[in-house]
Amino acid sequence: MNQRSQRSRHVSVGLVLVLPGLIMICAFAVFPLVYGIYLSFFAKHAWLPAYRFIGFGNYLRVLTDPELWRAFWVDLLYMGSTVSLQLATGMGMALLLNQKFLGRAIVRGALIFPYILPTVGAVVIWRWMFNDLAGVVNHILMELQVIDSPIVYSANPTTALVFVIIVAVYRFFPFITLALLARLQSIPVVLYEAAVVDGASPWRRFWNITLPQLEGVIVLVCILRGVWMFTEFDALYLLTGGGPLGATQTLPLLAYKKAFYTWKPGQGAAIAVFTMAVLLVGYLFYSKKQIELMEE
Amino acid sequence: MLSTRSGYYYWKVAKRVFLYCSVYLITTIVLFPLYWVVVSSLKTRGELFARVTLIPQQITVMNFVHLFTISGFHLFLRNSLIIALTVTLVVVSVAALAAYGIDRFRFRGRRTFVRLILTTYMFPLILLAIPIYTALGKMGLTNTFTGVILAQISYDLPFCTWLLWNFVKTVPLELEEASMIDGASRSQTFRWVVFPLMRPGIIAAGIFAFLWSWSDFVYPMILLSSDSKRTASLAVASFVGSLAIEWEYLLAGSVVLILPVIILFMYVAKYLVLGFGGGAVKE
């Protein structure tokens, strides 16, 4: 067989292999996205089949709705606090796990539990622990005389937010720990040895060696967790359903409410598109900053 | 010249103590909820609300019995299993083939395709749920298992493809070339050479797909309306929101929901460590 026909056979076999996957991914991933954007331009009641093209009407209604901007603010708050706390806790644990100690493998294995815990399970457990009648948290707080009577976390906007943030940190800090740990373990020990010889204190060693080495992973992990926290639906919906009077209602929750509760999928889709636009803008800002930094 | 117990020595001991204390404290905090839910599910309703005890005064399995006899939880478990297994099988096989194709063949639009997969991974479920629900509604697939399966595949497939692509990259090209020089066809090569070497990745992707489908309640919630078709996670989720929560059954249901996940994970953990680290994770 000459070169040319061998290569074209080569290519067509490849296409056959990849085609089902390609088609499915396009159908399942790309299509919903495009269709979602398409839907946002229509007014439609979820049950009735009639469509009415209203162009940017949904966007106008949605962007002038104070509820949207409130959800946006709550979402930013939620994302900011959860990611920073996850990072702090995760990094602390990673640094600890980087040391050798007895039972290290077991601890590392146990650490993944919060991350693999199904959302529904996590919600039940945490709502049970924060229960006002029989919950462990209230019990301990009262035993320690921090509070006089049980707190109903879901009744108060502030406690509701604190509650969902605690749950989010619990569930996702292992992700950060494991990512950082993998990177930590690949930092050459000689760097630290040289620093010790030069008389660097532990803090300086951390600040000038460890952190710069970790920078790439930290940034990546923060971006991932930022996106996922900004767009989280499952846990928030089950924990507070939007909190007392929208105190924990983030953009995804609002989109769901519009689409499935008030039966206006057009508006829901518009909110979803708005959320993605926000993420895109965030990403563009980040890229711009990267380019600026590189040009310095 | 060195004193037998210098201040430096005590400092080192203190650091060790601090290390052990913090690590085990955090581990306890991490694992306590698991202990708590299991223990709570074994308490009677009376004890649950009368006092908060670390160790139950009375152990009962009646909560679990009630779950299976009266609530019919086994039906929901069966539904979850059917859906999760189907999703896993489809996703892993399609993703494995697609990953292999992406890595080994240059075709037009390959670069954009890869970038596409990565970005869809960052898409949150709920943003895609609205169009998927509408589309499936038009196809008449609401309230069917097929609809839920398709919806879940849509979320799983990009990630698993990307995951398996990373594993395919680790299989050396020379092995395939050697096998083909020896006369094997490409599909034979894939089946007998590449696929076995991808096994850690296949297992990782399979576990991920299964666990995610098992835990998902959003798509079942949006798409299923018949009570009998509910999945286990949906069943537990719907009781969470009810006004008069019967905690003892809710806790028992959660335990039944969570336990397979933990067992599966423990069993398969060694494959994951091997796979993701590729040997780079030190012990």
Image (tube, coloured by chain):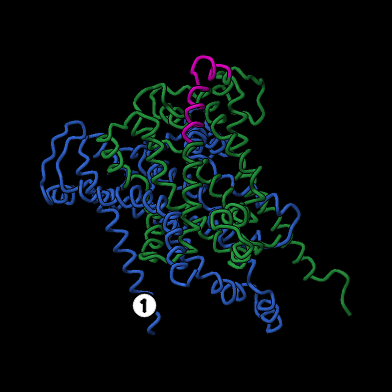
Secondary structure, mark 1, is: helix
Which amino acid does the dot numbered 1 rest on? Ile
Measuring 31% from the left and 68% from the top, which residue is drawn there?
Answer: A284
Residue B150 in sight: yes
Tell me what hue chain A is rendered in: blue
Question: Quick one: quadrant of the C terminus of chain A?
Answer: bottom left
Chain shown in green: B
> Residue A143's quadrant in the figure?
top right
Q: Is residue B269 left or right of residue A40?
A: right
Q: Relative to B148, is B275 on the left or the right?
A: right
Residue closest to the eye, B139 or A4:
A4
Is residue B253 placed above or below A73 in the rendered structure?
Answer: above
Indicate whether A28 appears above or below B65.
below
**Taken as a whole, is the magenta stretch helix, strand or loop?**
helix
Residue B48 on image: x %, y %: 56, 24
Residue A197, percent from left and from top: 71, 82
Instruction: Give the magenta-colored segment's residue range.
Output: B65-84
Q: Position of residue A122 (x, y in %)?
A: 50, 38
Within 10 angstroms of label 1, few (less than 14), some, or many (20 or more) residues? few
Tell which residue pokes out farthest to the front in this image.
A1
Above or below: residue B282 compared with residue A229: below
Residue hosting label 1: A291
Q: How many marks?
A: 1
Question: Is-magenta flag for residue B69?
Answer: yes
Residue A212 position in % (x across, y down): 54, 74
A219 or B277, nearer to the observer: B277
Depth check, front residue: B77 or B138: B138
Chain letter behind tag 1? A
Q: Is residue B255 magenta?
A: no
Q: Nearer the viewer, residue A137 or B131?
A: B131
